[in-house]
């Protein structure tokens, strides 16, 4: 019994001594309490610890109260597999950093050997930006209202974020625009942190772009230039473009233990190498395609060649063909095989299957030896010469023609020139996404003020008399930055994915150079001065007037074309003096044109009338599902004469020079 009673007493005594020790600590920590008691303030070193047992003396002293227990080593908190994963992640992050640093250093060394940039502001946006900012500063009331509006939107965003954190289901304050793919990953909506980041960015970017758009008292072209570059800037600062703020990229880093970043930096280094020290973002796997083997495979012959083109005639696939052959002039900015990518979407193969004898101009990829070739040279050696050779080959006195994009602008000039001279060799003309009137030519107008044209001329002089293909590629990519720049930046570099094989993007990367004389004439007389439809353009000794062109015209436009906007194309259609059939296709500059009927994609609209305004045309148009090709083929057949035996390109009057697709198309602008 004595033993049973002793144990409780010992516990009680120990507890009392512990309480005394705690009380002593409190006294040492609170001098005010000591002062109230009238006792002198105790110093920490004067406080004696309570008596310790032998076992307590043997143990190490406890940490000071308030510090908590010692934090265990990080490694001890992980399983062997987890520890290995962290080590792998760390090693891969280091590899990625070293790869990126090496690539940037190599690029810097390459750039050091090059001449200094012609101008730090190649698009001459600074004067326009200064004018817009000056106008904004002169309207402080508008600026204050805009700031108050932005603050109000942020207050609403913070409130909804707090309500969501409390478990409430709330609607977003702002959402991405329709078609904006940057925030498609589910975490942008489901994760509160990323959702807040996304909405904060959208509020700020929409506010800034809207502020510029609402400025008044500024030249419209000046304001549009600032709007364009402001959007480029806000697009660049999207949180989706940075690793730390992109949930999909972060998830990929974790899942691959950092290997995705290693691959991404290897892709980055390879693109810098391919661009010769400038970043040339890969949009597709270029090694997967070869011209003449798995793209541009329609059988045929090169039946004629001069300095600027090879004339291709394709094998017939029907026993009889239309008497009047079809001659196609594609844009010389790209290669002709946009119309012959794969057999299943090849316009050339489809046209031969409809019973047409198809010829295509394959333009040269010019170098400095052709720098002096002019727009008039392209008209004479291109349109005139090719049409004559087709007539010779087929034994006819007329041809039907097609002009695609800039090739259509050249064809329009040739038609006006022929009309002035009474030349009737062209029976009809079809235009794919081509412009004649450039008053509403879209965002490309922003790049054609005189200061920018002078910079382009200096760049061409520096390159040896031509515009490098990468310059054209960069310009077109900038028109759709989120789709053609940033989406690949994220996929290739932040997520380490290899670009997937895509024939259209392979063709898009296979751009050509531009001769100086030809290109400057085109930019100045069409984009800058809009000289053709205003009666100010003379060429080859003739003043050009499209109203004198009386042959049948078929004009195709695309609803979402950002290079040749349908409003601009419609203005050109009304400039001709003969019967014009105008059609609008779904999609954009490429997919709107290259839309095989078997794909059963998109739609098109037709209207037999051609009212003064395109909005009236749209109001009276009838929508049809699928491709517009059958509608055009019916129109073309009605103007192509009787049926004659199919024409073998190897047995015509012109001796074949080589098999299609020819050698001109194989010349690369870059190694």
Image (spheres, helix red, strand yellow):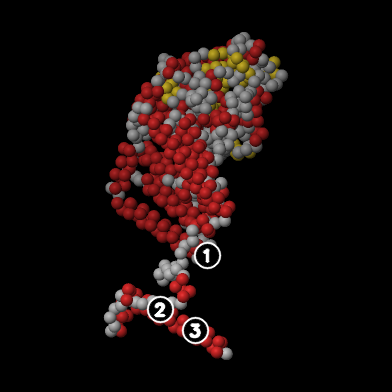
Measure the alpha-carbon separation of dots 2 and 1: 51 Å
Q: Quadrant of residue 312?
A: top right
Q: Secondary structure at mark 3?
A: helix
Q: Are marks 1 and 3 in contact (CB under 8 Å)?
A: no
In-front residue for pair 529/345: 345
Observer-side mark, 2 or 1, equals 2
* Residue 332: % across, % down: 50, 23
- Mark 3 — residue? 10
Q: Are marks 2 and 3 in contact (CB under 8 Å)?
A: no
- Mark 1 — residue? 167
* Residue 317: % across, % down: 69, 21
Q: Looking at the image, is mark 1 or mark 3 earlier in the sequence?
A: 3
Q: Secondary structure at mark 1?
A: loop
Q: Looking at the image, is mark 2 or mark 3 earlier in the sequence?
A: 3
In-front residue for pair 589/435: 589
Q: Quadrant of residue 592?
A: top right
Q: Residues within 10 Å of mark 2 (few under 14, many from 20)?
A: few
Observer-side mark, 1 or 3, equals 3
For image coordinates 59% across by 28% down, the residue present is 289
Q: Looking at the image, is mark 2 or mark 1 earlier in the sequence?
A: 2
- Mark 2 — residue? 50
For image coordinates 29% across by 78% down, the residue present is 41
In-front residue for pair 652/613: 652
Q: Secondary structure at mark 2?
A: loop
For image coordinates 28% across by 47% down, the residue present is 138
Q: Residues within 10 Å of mark 3 (few under 14, many from 20)?
A: few
For residue 187, side relative to residue 217 (left or right): right
Measure the alpha-carbon separation of dots 1 and 3: 52 Å
Q: Are marks 2 and 1 in contact (CB under 8 Å)?
A: no
Q: Residues within 10 Å of mark 1 (few under 14, many from 20)?
A: few
Please identify the quadrant where the N terminus is shown: bottom right
For residue 183, side relative to residue 130 (left or right): right
């Amino acid at each position: 019994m004595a033993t049973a009673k002793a144990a409780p007493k010992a516990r009680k005594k120990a507890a009392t001594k512990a309480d005394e020790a705690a009380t002593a600590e409190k006294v040492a920590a609170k001098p005010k309490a000591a002062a109230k008691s009238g006792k002198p303030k105790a110093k920490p070193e004067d406080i004696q610890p309570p008596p310790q047992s032998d076992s307590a003396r043997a143990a190490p002293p406890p940490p000071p109260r308030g510090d908590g227990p010692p934090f265990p080593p990080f490694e001890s908190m992980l399983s062997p597999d987890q520890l290995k994963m962290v080590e792998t992640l760390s090693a891969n992050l280091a590899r990625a950093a070293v790869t990126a640093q090496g690539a940037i250093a190599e690029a810097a060394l390459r750039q050091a050997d090059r001449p200094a940039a012609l101008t730090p502001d190649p698009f001459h946006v600074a004067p326009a930006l200064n004018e817009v900012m000056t106008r904004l500063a002169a309207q402080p009331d508008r600026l204050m209202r805009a700031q108050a509006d932005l603050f109000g939107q942020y207050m609403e965003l913070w409130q909804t974020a707090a309500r969501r954190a409390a478990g409430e289901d709330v609607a977003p304050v702002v959402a991405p625009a329709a078609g904006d793919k940057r925030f498609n990953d589910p975490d942008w909506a489901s994760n509160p942190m990323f959702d807040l980041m996304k909405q904060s960015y959208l509020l700020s970017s929409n506010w800034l772009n809207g502020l510029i758009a609402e400025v008044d008292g500024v030249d419209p072209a000046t304001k549009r230039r600032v709007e364009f570059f402001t959007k480029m800037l806000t697009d660049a600062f999207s949180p989706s473009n940075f690793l730390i703020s992109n949930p999909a990229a972060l998830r990929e880093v974790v899942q691959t233990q950092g290997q995705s970043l290693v691959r991404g930096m290897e892709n980055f280094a390879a693109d810098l190498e391919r661009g010769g020290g400038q970043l040339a973002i890969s949009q597709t796997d270029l090694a997967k395609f070869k011209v003449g083997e798995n793209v541009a495979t329609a059988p045929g012959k090169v039946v004629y060649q001069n300095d600027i083109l090879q004339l291709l005639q394709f094998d017939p696939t029907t026993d009889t063909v239309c008497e009047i052959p079809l001659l196609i002039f594609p844009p010389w900015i790209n290669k002709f095989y946009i119309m012959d990518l794969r057999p299943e979407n090849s316009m050339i193969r489809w046209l031969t299957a409809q019973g047409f004898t198809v010829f295509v101009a394959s333009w040269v990829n010019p170098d400095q030896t052709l720098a002096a070739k002019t727009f008039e040279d392209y008209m004479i050696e291109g349109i005139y010469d090719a049409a004559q050779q087709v007539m010779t080959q087929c034994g006819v006195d007329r041809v039907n023609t097609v002009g695609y994009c800039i090739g259509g602008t050249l064809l329009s000039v040739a038609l006006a020139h022929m009309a002035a001279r009474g030349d009737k060799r062209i029976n009809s003309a079809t235009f794919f996404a081509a412009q004649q009137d450039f008053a509403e030519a879209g965002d490309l107008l922003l790049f054609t003020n005189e200061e920018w044209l002078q910079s382009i001329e200096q760049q061409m002089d520096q390159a040896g008399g031509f515009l490098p293909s990468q310059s054209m590629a960069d310009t077109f990519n900038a028109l759709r930055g989120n789709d053609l720049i940033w989406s690949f930046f994220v996929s290739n570099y932040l997520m380490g994915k290899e670009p997937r094989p895509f024939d259209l993007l392979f063709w898009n990367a296979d751009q050509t150079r531009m001769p100086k004389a030809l290109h400057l004439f085109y930019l100045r007389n069409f984009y800058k001065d809009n000289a053709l439809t205003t009666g100010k353009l003379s060429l080859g000794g003739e003043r050009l007037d499209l109203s004198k062109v009386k042959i049948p015209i078929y004009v195709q436009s695309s609803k979402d074309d950002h290079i040749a906007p349908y409003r601009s194309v419609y203005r050109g259609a009304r400039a001709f003096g003969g019967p014009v059939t105008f059609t609008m296709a779904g999609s954009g500059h490429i997919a709107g044109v290259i839309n095989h009927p078997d794909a059963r994609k998109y739609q098109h609209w037709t209207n037999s009338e051609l009212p003064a305004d395109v909005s009236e045309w749209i109001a009276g148009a009838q929508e049809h599902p699928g491709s517009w090709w059958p509608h055009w083929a019916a129109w073309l057949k009605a103007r192509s004469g009787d049926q004659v035996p199919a024409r073998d390109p190897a047995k015509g009057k012109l001796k074949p020079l080589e098999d299609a697709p020819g050698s001109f198309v194989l010349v690369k602008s870059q190694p």
